[in-house]
């Protein structure tokens, strides 16, 4: 795998659901990160867990390319990347009940009231995440934005299918690129985790 963008999936179709067994060399539990950016988190986490596969979704080409290069340099064969819009991939391309964990860290907060409808985590996100998580799978969320954190909690509070958990320290210790910037500015990270009833 020495060609550029080797970790970046080359879509032959954007209407057929993805087959994870064709993306990864090892059949093992798979975790997803949505909005992975340059992938500081995924890069470190995938190195810690060769016994799991990791799929990163990001819409900006420059960011996934950078992550692909970094992943290749690190010799990762358990990491693959999709350059695509999150809602589309969630609704149409990701297989059902396929992911043991989903990570969404610092999704765009859309702070103005009139833009809040663009936030990823809101009531219409529940069926999307329920469809792709394996039973017992966990959604991990982080944000620096208190109003968005409220909205995340509110979204899951009314759902009987998800049980709130705490984020394990081994996970929260791995910071993301944006998180390092916010922490340096004195902001704090808010964490939430929700397990899908098995
Ligand atoms: C604030 S950054 C956080 C990046 C990374 N998770 C981190 O914490 O360092 C949000 C990322 O999500 C990506 N993103 C935002 N909306 C998206 C969407 N609808 N589909 C795919 N990626 C999206 C952005 O391009 C950006 O890289």
Image (cartoon, rainbow, N blue to C red):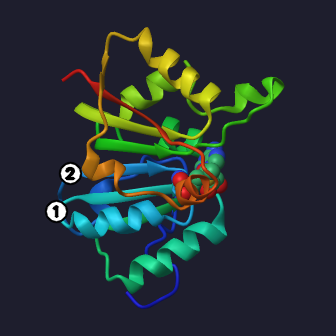
Q: Secondary structure at mark 1?
A: loop
Disc on the earlier residue, 2 or 1:
2
Q: Residue furthest front?
A: 186
The residue located at (52%, 25%) in the rendering is 152
Ligand 1 has an atom within 8 Å of the beta carbon of the residue at disc 2: no
Q: Nearer the viewer, residue 10 or 147?
A: 147
Name above or below for residue 48 compared with residue 93.
Answer: below
Q: Are marks 2 and 1 in contact (CB under 8 Å)?
A: yes
Name above or below for residue 76 compared with residue 40.
Answer: below
Q: Where's the C terminus, which quadrant?
A: top left
Judge from the rendering whether residue 1 lies leftward or rightward of residue 112; answer left or right.
Answer: left
In which quadrant of the rendered view does residue 114 lie? top right
Residue 159 in view of the camera: yes
In which quadrant of the rendered view does residue 52 lie? bottom left
Residue under label 1? 51
Q: Nearer the viewer, residue 177 or 5?
A: 177
Image coords of residue 122 (percent x, y) = 57, 23
Q: Secondary structure at mark 2?
A: loop
Image coords of residue 95 (percent x, y) = 36, 42
Residue under label 2? 29
The residue located at (17%, 56%) in the rendering is 28
The residue located at (54%, 39%) in the rendering is 143
Ligand 1 has an atom within 8 Å of the beta carbon of the residue at disc 1: no
In which quadrant of the rendered view does residue 59 lie? bottom right
Q: Where's the N terminus, which quadrant?
A: bottom left
Local crowd at mark 2 within 10 Å, few (<14), some, or many (≥20)? some
The residue located at (39%, 11%) in the rendering is 159
Q: Nearer the viewer, residue 170 or 137?
A: 170
């Amino acid at each position: 795998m020495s060609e550029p963008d080797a970790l970046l999936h080359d879509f032959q179709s954007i209407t057929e659901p993805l087959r994870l067994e064709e993306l990864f060399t090892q059949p093992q539990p798979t975790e997803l990160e949505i909005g992975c950016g340059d992938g500081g988190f995924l890069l470190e986490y995938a190195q810690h867990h060769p016994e799991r596969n990791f799929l990163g979704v990001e819409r900006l080409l420059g960011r996934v390319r950078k992550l692909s290069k970094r992943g290749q340099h690190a010799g990762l064969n358990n990491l693959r990347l999709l350059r695509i819009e999150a809602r589309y991939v969630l609704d149409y391309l990701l297989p059902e009940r396929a992911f043991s964990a989903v990570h969404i860290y610092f999704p765009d907060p859309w702070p103005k009231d009139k833009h809040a409808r663009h936030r990823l985590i809101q009531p219409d996100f529940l069926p999307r995440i329920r469809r792709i998580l394996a039973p017992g799978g966990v959604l991990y969320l982080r944000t620096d934005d208190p109003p968005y954190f409220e909205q995340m909690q509110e979204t899951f509070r009314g759902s009987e299918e998800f049980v709130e958990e705490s984020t394990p320290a081994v996970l929260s210790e791995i910071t993301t690129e944006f998180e390092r910037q916010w922490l340096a500015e004195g902001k704090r990270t808010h964490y939430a985790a929700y397990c899908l009833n098995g």
